[in-house]
Amino acid sequence: MPFSNPGSPTPSGSGLSQAQLARARSYSYRLFSELYLRGITAVSLPYLQQIPELTAVLPTPFYADSAAAAHHDLFQFNIFPYESFFLGDDGLVGGEVTAVVNQHYFQLGWQTAVADTEADHLGQELACLAFLVAEEAEAWESDQPGAAHDWQTRQQFFLHSHLLCWAPTCLLAIQRQSNPFFAELAHMTLTLLLSHVGNVTPPPDFLPPNQDILANEKSGFKEIVHFLLLPALSGITLSRDNIGQLGRQFDLPRGFGSRETMLLNLLRTAGQYDALPALLTALQETCRRWQSSYQQLIDQHSQTALFIQPWQARAAATEQMVIELMASSIAE
C-alpha cells in the first residue's frame, strides 16, 4: 500500500499545527504497522530511505527474500508481538484478550488491516491508532475542533486499554535482539507511543496475579522455565536467541526446538556441569537490565509510570526469585 512520507516521527511541541502533528503521527503509525506486519518490502523501502534513523540501519544491499526471512525469524521464533501473549499467563495467542481487542476495534469504527493475522498483533493495533489519528487530522482540517477532540479521546482510550499495557515490554524485547533495523524501529515506535500519551488515570490491573512458584515444594525446572518465559509473570522476555546466547556464554548445550525445550535443557546441563550458579547469576543480571530499562522509560516519560511500574515490579520479583533459587535445592 502506498504511504505518505512521515519523515522522522515528530513529538508534540515541535511547532507543527495540531492537524500537521496528527498527520505526521498517522503516517508514522501506518508505516510502522506495515513493517511489523510484513517486514521491509520493495514498497516500503523508498519511504524508509527518507527516514535517516532507519536508513542508517537498512540491510544493504537489499534483498526482498533476505528481508522476509529476517522478519520471519524475529517474529515467528523469537518475539511474539501479540497482546494476548504478553499479557497472558499461558503463553498462547488469541482467546479472550484478542476478542476484547476486536470488540474495541468495532466500537472505534475500524476494521483490522490484515484478515489472516490476529487482531491483537502489534502491527494491527498500530494500524488502528493510525486510523484514529488520521480521523483527528481530518477533523482539524475541516475546522471541527469538537470532532478532533473526540478522536483524541478515542486514541487515549485505545492507548490506555491496550498498547500502553504491553507494547513497551514488547518493544524493549525487540531492541534486545540482533536485528539492528527492527531494534531501531522499536526504539522509534516506543518514543512515538509514549510521547502520544495524554492525562493518565490509574489503569486497572492488566497483569495476571503474582505467582510465587518457589513456595510450592513440587516446583522444579519445568515450572521455573514456564514462569521465566511468560512476560506477564516474570516481567522479562527471553527469546530463543537470548537463550542461545546464554548457552554459548557458558559453553553449555541447549539443543533445538521451542524456547521451553531450550531453556529447560540449558538449566539441566548447567546443573550437570556445575555451571548453574553462573547461569543463575546471568539471569539475575538480565532481570536487573530489564529493571533499568523500565526505569529509563519512567524517567523519560513520567506520565506513563503507572503502566511501566507494574512490569518493573515483576522483573524485580523475578530477580529475587532467582536469588532464592541459588540457595535452594530445587532439582528435577
Image (spheres, rainbow, N blue to C red):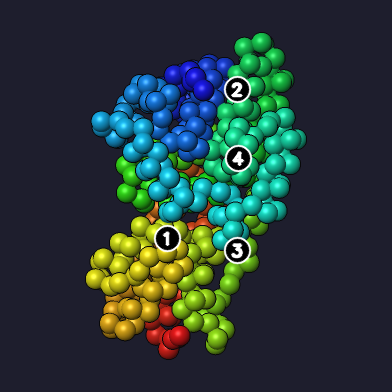
Q: Distance between the residues labelled 3 and 1?
A: 15 Å
Task: Single out the mark in the foreground, 2 or 4.
Answer: 4
Image coordinates of residue 92 in percent, x first then y, are 59, 58
Residue that mark 2 sits on: 134
Give whichever of 107, 248 is nearer the camera. 248
Task: Single out the mark in the foreground, 4 or 3.
Answer: 4
Residue that mark 1 sits on: 238
In primary-sequence order, the first of circles 1 and 2 is 2
Label 3 sits on a secondary structure element that is loop
Q: Residues within 10 Å of mark 4 (few under 14, many from 20)?
A: few
Task: Please say if 215 is above or below 137.
Answer: below
Image coordinates of residue 14 in percent, x first then y, are 45, 22
Q: Distance between the residues labelled 1 and 2?
A: 35 Å
Task: Single out the mark in the foreground, 1 or 2.
Answer: 1
Label 2 sits on a secondary structure element that is helix
In primary-sequence order, the first of circles 3 and 2 is 3
